[in-house]
Image: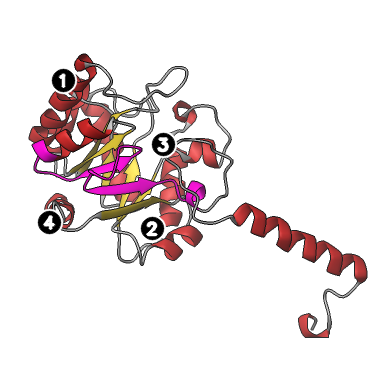
Amino acid sequence: MLAKTSKLILKKKHKSKIVCLTAYSKNIAEEIDSYTDLILVGDSLGSVLYNFDTTRKVNLTMMIEHSKSVRKGVKKSLMIVDMPFNTYKNKSQALKNCKKVMKETKCDGIKLEGGKKIIDIVKHLVKFKIPVMGHIGIMPQSVRGKFKYKGKTNTEKNKLLKDSKSLEEAGVFAIVLECIERKLSKEITDSINIPTIGIGSSNFCDGQIMVTDDLLGLTDTKIKFVKKYADLKGSVKNAVKKFKLDVKKGSYPSIKYSY
């Protein structure tokens, strides 16, 4: 599994931009699967689906059940699952929980947030053939207060460069760069031999990921890097209004829609 996942992603470095989106259910997964290289079952489902104010409230059971649903809709893309907060505090806990996720969801890999602090955990997982994707920059499981982009100071810059190199050496197959200053994103991408997947981190990254609900206009987010490619919220409202009118007029269900 580790070799397969790594090979599929690594071969795209500097050759083809990697397209990544999130999915939390079979219905969305099967619609995006033809266009994506990687589908992430993100712990962002906490805010998108459950209205949590932090991803810290997402638990392992939620991630597993949503991932099972997504798996049914994925045929082509690699499916990666976020390990939620407090499920990889040490090597033994991380291995136990990651094995459980891999087995029950049949995913192609897992994603962990962190740099230097989790290097030993990453090495341990890779040793047991578990494909790991890294995540540095803004890390929602660690953030307190407002999100602020990273890489403004030399201290942040040096830390992120060291973290990315350390993660590569530990064996991750790719790294998500979240809200990292554009020049630093380029420097990180150029300095490592594994792909970087950007979210709010410029087009210098080897690929991009977005929350699908944001892309489709199903959320009201005002985040700077979010580009809405559709207005499904408006489409839903229009469809429901039409349904209401048909019901009120008695024109639905007509003979065509009746037994």
Q: Which badge, 2 or 1, is on the more N-terminal residue?
A: 2
Say what secondary structure mark 4 lies in. loop
The circle on residue 71 is: 2
Marks 1 and 4 close (CB-CB < 8 Å): no
Front-most of 2 and 137? 137
Q: Which residue is mark 3?
A: 60
Query: Alpha carbon of mark 3 to alpha carbon of mark 1: how far?
Result: 33 Å
x 30%, y 60%: residue: 77
Query: Alpha carbon of mark 4 to alpha carbon of mark 2: how far?
Result: 24 Å
x 16%, y 31%: residue: 164
Judge the density around disc 3: few (<14), some (14-19), many (≥20) Cα neighbours within 10 Å. some
Say what secondary structure mark 1 lies in. helix
The circle on residue 11 is: 4
Query: Alpha carbon of mark 2 to alpha carbon of mark 3: how far?
Result: 16 Å
Query: Alpha carbon of mark 1 to alpha carbon of mark 4: how far?
Result: 27 Å
- Image x and y of residue 166, in percent: 11, 28
Residue extent of the magenta highlight = 190-215
In this view of the protein, can residue 127 be seen by the observer?
no
Q: Which badge, 1 or 4, is on the more N-terminal residue?
A: 4
x 15%, y 34%: residue: 187
In this view of the protein, can residue 91 be seen by the observer?
yes
Which amino acid lies under the numbered mark 1 shown in the image of this protein? Asn
The circle on residue 33 is: none
